[in-house]
Image: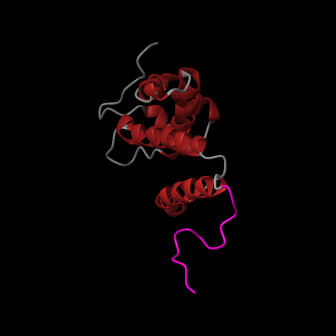
Amino acid sequence: MAAPPRMQDGLDPRFARFRATGDMRVRNALVEDYSWLASFCASRFARRGEPRDDLVQVALLGLVNAVNRFDPDRDLSFSTFAVPTIDGELRRYFRDKTWTVHVTRRVKDAARRVAPAVDDLTALWAALRRLPRSPSTPPWRPRTC
């Protein structure tokens, strides 16, 4: 793969052309030339048990978003702008994949806090079911006459 053309200030002139015209052929050429960046970001998430091809595909979606949103008039190199965008897309992929329904972080934290009480009550219920008789009063409460 040939290195993308560079201007004096280090920016690819095609970014300005894409920003001005919105030409999809220019955007696609930029995505192809910077696909190494998506592959690099995907490799940093490779040890999480997902196939590499899936990670590269998600990273390429982040790269397309980065190319669409990049403003060449700002004093920022494209790779500096694109890496957090690509990483964010990969993190979103893992976050969305872990839950089948979107649940807020607050609800997930509450579920983690309640889990030990659920385990205790489940153990208590199992112990009560093993009694030879049905208890007249709960065994954890003292009898009153």
Residue 21 in view in this figure: no
Residue drawn where x is 43% and y is 33% of the image? 13
Residue drawn where x is 66% and y is 46% of the image? 100
Residue 66 in view in this figure: yes
- Outermost residue on the right side: it is 134
Does 125 sit above or below residue 28?
below
- Outermost residue on the front side: it is 145
Looking at the rendering, in which quadrant would you find the C terminus? Answer: bottom right
Does 60 sit above or below residue 122?
above
Residue 32 figure quarter: top right
Residue 25 figure quarter: top right
Q: Position of residue 108 (x, y in %)?
A: 52, 57
The number of callouts visible is 0
* 63 falls in the magenta region: no
Q: Where is residue 28 in the image (x, y as percent from the top left)?
A: 59, 29
Q: Position of residue 85 (x, y in %)?
A: 46, 42
Highlighted magenta segment, given as a residue range: 132-145
Taken as a whole, is the magenta stretch helix, strand or loop?
loop
Left or right of residue 18, residue 73 in this image? left
Does 65 sit above or below residue 133?
above
Q: Where is residue 87 in the image (x, y as percent from the top left)?
A: 44, 39
Does 54 sit above or below residue 96?
above
Residue drawn where x is 53% and y is 21% of the image? 52
* 143 falls in the magenta region: yes
Of residues 143 and 37, the one nearer the viewer is 143
Of residues 121 and 30, the one nearer the viewer is 121
